[in-house]
Image: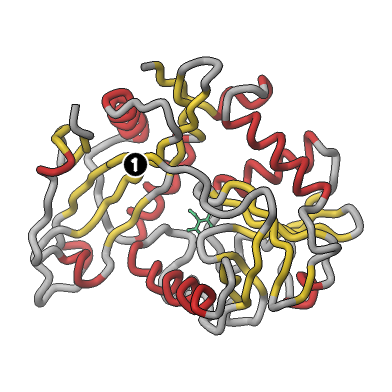
Amino acid sequence: MKPQVFFDRKFIPLDEANVPITTHALHYGTGCFEGIRAYYSKKMDALFIFRVDDHYKRMLQSCKILFIDLPYSLEKLIDITKELVKKNFEKTDLYIRPLAFKSDPAVGNFNLKTLRDSFLIYTVPLGRYGDIKKGIHCKISSWVRVSDNQIPPRGKITGSYVNTSLAKTESSLAGYDEALFLDHKGNVVEGSAENLFIVKNNIAYTPPISDDILQGVTRDTVIKIIKEDLNIEVKEESLVKTQLTSADEVFLVGTGAEILPVIEIDDRKIGDGVVGEITGKVQDIYNKLVHGEYPKYLEFLTKISS
Ligand SMILES: Cc1ncc(COP(=O)(O)O)c(C=O)c1O
């Protein structure tokens, strides 16, 4: 069967789901979205959707910022997503992309409250995002992270991903794998689409949610893993650039990126320039957890069988 999408209240084939060229969100970035993974377990021949409820809770917050009024409860959004994953079941990891956006014609109206909303979800197979085995090289971006009083980074707002794209393009053109953002105060806040952790003297640090970061679902999971499973202290503190280059370990975390070791920043080795010990342990636990092989965290998973 052709891949299905959920678009404006019904399931239809992907190639029939189109928007008019006049769509407000296409012109002005007035939408918000989520990125959710479903992991395929060979052992159980099932897909496990990871923390679907937390992703939709965040999406409803993003919608609030944009005055998008979804006609669905949290429970209904989860049900629709389960049904879609079942329809598009593949024996591979899937990425689930819900998108809510302003769909009225663009010209002449910037009052978010008066514009019509649309909602869709589609799925796409997605493998690894970066080199999680060897680690990556990062560049501190010359593009500053958007702040809460500009386009709130706490919402996953489509327009703010221009900021992401500029940073990512700059780092790619300069030969690096990923960009790291400073905020307007000069603190290092996150990667282009990942939250950031460092380890120094056996303590983990990550920027607080009051810095300009997305409050990541993976970040929250990793904080739990480090505290509860590795018995290591986690401090939520603002970080400056030299704390990163003098760290023992640095890694990025996100739905797409998973647990991505950083082995070099601005051409300076992090630690010994190889994947750190704690990073490796977090990777192992995270990998088990998302595949349903870590009983303590089964509540994070929604099982979909073929
Ligand atoms: C800017 C930004 N920061 C952090 C993250 C990580 O968030 P999560 O772990 O919820 O995917 C993402 C990815 O969604 C992102 O786009």
Query: Image check: 156 left or right of 3?
Result: right
Q: Quadrant of residue 305?
A: top left
Q: Residue at x 28, y 58 (%)?
A: 67
In the image, residue 177 above or below residue 260 = below
Give x and y (percent) for residue 213: 56, 63
Pick whichever, 230 or 271, lies toward us.
271
Could you tell me residue 18's position as x and y percent?
A: 12, 51
Q: Is residue 160 left or right of residue 260?
A: left
Query: What percent of the width, then of the height, locates residue 176?
Result: 59, 72
Residue 21 falls in image quadrant: bottom left
Say which amino acid is labelled 1. Answer: Val
- Position of 258 compared to 35: left or right? right
Judged left or right of residue 5, residue 132 is: right
Q: Quadrant of the N terminus?
A: top left
Colour basis: secondary structure
Residue in front for this viewpoint, 57 or 191: 191
Q: Residues within 10 Å of mark 1 (few under 14, many from 20)?
A: some
- Which residue is at the far bottom? 142
Q: Residue at coordinates 63% horizontally, 70% vertically from top-left?
A: 138
Residue at left 32%, top 39%?
123
Q: Identify the image quadrant of the C terminus.
A: top left
**Does residue 165 lie above or below 119 as drawn?**
below
Task: Identify the residue at image location x=11%, y=61%.
Answer: 104
The residue identified by callout 1 is 124
